[in-house]
Amino acid sequence: MLTAHDFIADVAQEIADFKHHFRLETATDLITTTESGEKLGFMDVVIEGGGVKGIAAIGALYALEECGLRFRKIAGTSAGALNAAFLACAGNSATQHRTALLLDILANIDFLSFADGGDDAQAVVKLLTLPDTESAVETFVNRAKVTIAVLRNLNEVMIRLGLNPGKRLKHFLREEFEQLNGGEPFTIGSLRNKWRRDAILIDGEYLEQDFQVVISDITHKRKVVFPLDLDEYVYDTDAILLSDIVRASASIPMFFSPFRLRDFATEAYNFKAPDDTCFMDGFIVSNFPLSLFDISDFARAPKCPTFGLMVEDISQQNDHPELNNFFKLGLAVFQTASQHGDKGYIHSNPHNASRIIHISNRIRRENQDHYVSAIDFTLGDEDKIQLFHNGVRAVLDKLASWNFHEYIRRYRR
């Protein structure tokens, strides 16, 4: 089992060396000094969805906190929603180093264990992650195995509309969040109460904390943001478990069954919308919701930046992977749909590129480059550590050239 030390040992000195030259005042205007005399700066962060690549985002979050930055508003989609939720739930105060509290949990997630559709479902997942080989015969055999495994699952897939029911993921999230909440269910209300207890005053104003995840409402064919839009579906939003909205955002099409409103752990009389309302993975509509916390009023400059954490999706095939099975084809269709709006927003607003932290998905395995995909569910420990380090180094590179005041001067005035 990996420990926090396994992840940070090889980059601790790099971070320490960087901090000697880093000035917090260049990163944000939202700065406070704790009772112990530590100076901390706040920022907002949006975490892209990306399956197992989310380990790299954890490295980026860790490095930001090591450099004295903390998170005011946090958002994400799919795997990014999972990371965002853990970050929002951890600790008793927004001034705490929350990523450090989570490393042991997030580092040891067995993604394959969430394939709870039986042995055949796990076989499909394992076979899908096998790369094509130079041997045409071996590649053909692997594809045939995938086809056979899918066919063996076809009846279950048709009934539950996915390879896996997703109950293990839901149970895992609920248990882990409860532990972070002293053994009590972690609801939206619990999070809001924590924010009220953690009232931080900066320059005469209370810190406005927030947490949001993007979800696809398939029934009404729309993008929803929870908890923001939750009152359209239930009467008492405070009663909804954080684990349920994360599970809804991470309902990967074909891999997990859709998450329906009746699957939320609340009383039936709390439902405002039909209880068969169907939610699926947020990446269908917006995998990188960078604009979620943006202020549209350009006459009022933001007090802190919103950084977007984006893990690259470069593949061994020069970013043009062969779509040789239905799962890959379906994933490519959804990626095209989800990224169209996000990329359009980024390209049409030149200031966006400057606040994106691009993290490499390239690691070294057996002296060869390997590009981690969203469905590399069988990643080894060394692979996870390398991804984490990629996130750390991407942040150090970004902060080395980032200047919040220059950003405001160029793009907000």
Image (cartoon, helix red, strand yellow):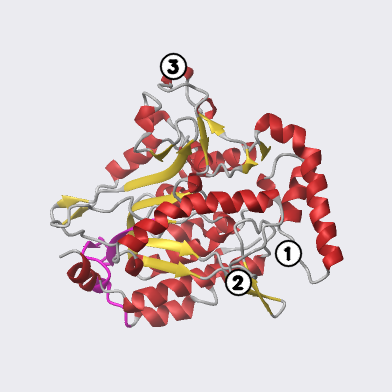
Type of amino acid under label 2: Asn
Residue 183 position in % (x across, y down)? 50, 38
What residue is disc 3 on? Answer: 269
Q: Give the range drawn in magenta.
A: 21-46
- Left or right: where 326 falls relative to 220: right
Residue 45 at least partly seen: no
* Above or below, comparing residue 400 to residue 158 in the picture: below
- Sooner in the amino-acid sequence: mark 1 or mark 3: 1
Return the x and y of residue 284 as percentages of the image width and height: 50, 46
Tell which of 291 and 66 is nearer to you. Answer: 291
- x 64%, y 64%: residue: 321
Disc 1 marks a residue whose amino acid type is Pro
Looking at the picture, tell me which residue is in the foreground, 1 or 393.
393
**Residue 296 shown in magenta:** no
Position of 27 relative to 328 (above/below): below
**What kind of residue is marked 3?**
Tyr
First of labels 2, 1 by sequence position: 1
Position of residue 324 measured from the top left corner of the image (x, y, whole percent): 71, 56
Residue placed under numbered mark 2 in the picture: 318
Q: Which residue is drawn at 20% across and 67% down?
A: 408
Q: Which residue corresponds to mark 1?
A: 131
Q: Which of marks 2 and 3 is nearer the N terminus?
A: 3
The quadrant of the rendering that contains the C terminus is bottom left
Asked if the magenta segment contains residue 41, the reply would be yes
| Numbered label tally | 3
Mark 3: few/some/many CA within 10 Å (<14, 14-19, 20+): few
* Distance between the alpha carbons at the discs numbered 1 and 3: 49 Å
In this picture, residue 73 sits left or right of residue 380: left
Q: Count residues near mark 1 (Cα–Cα under 10 Å), then give few for <14, some for 14-19, many for 20+.
A: few
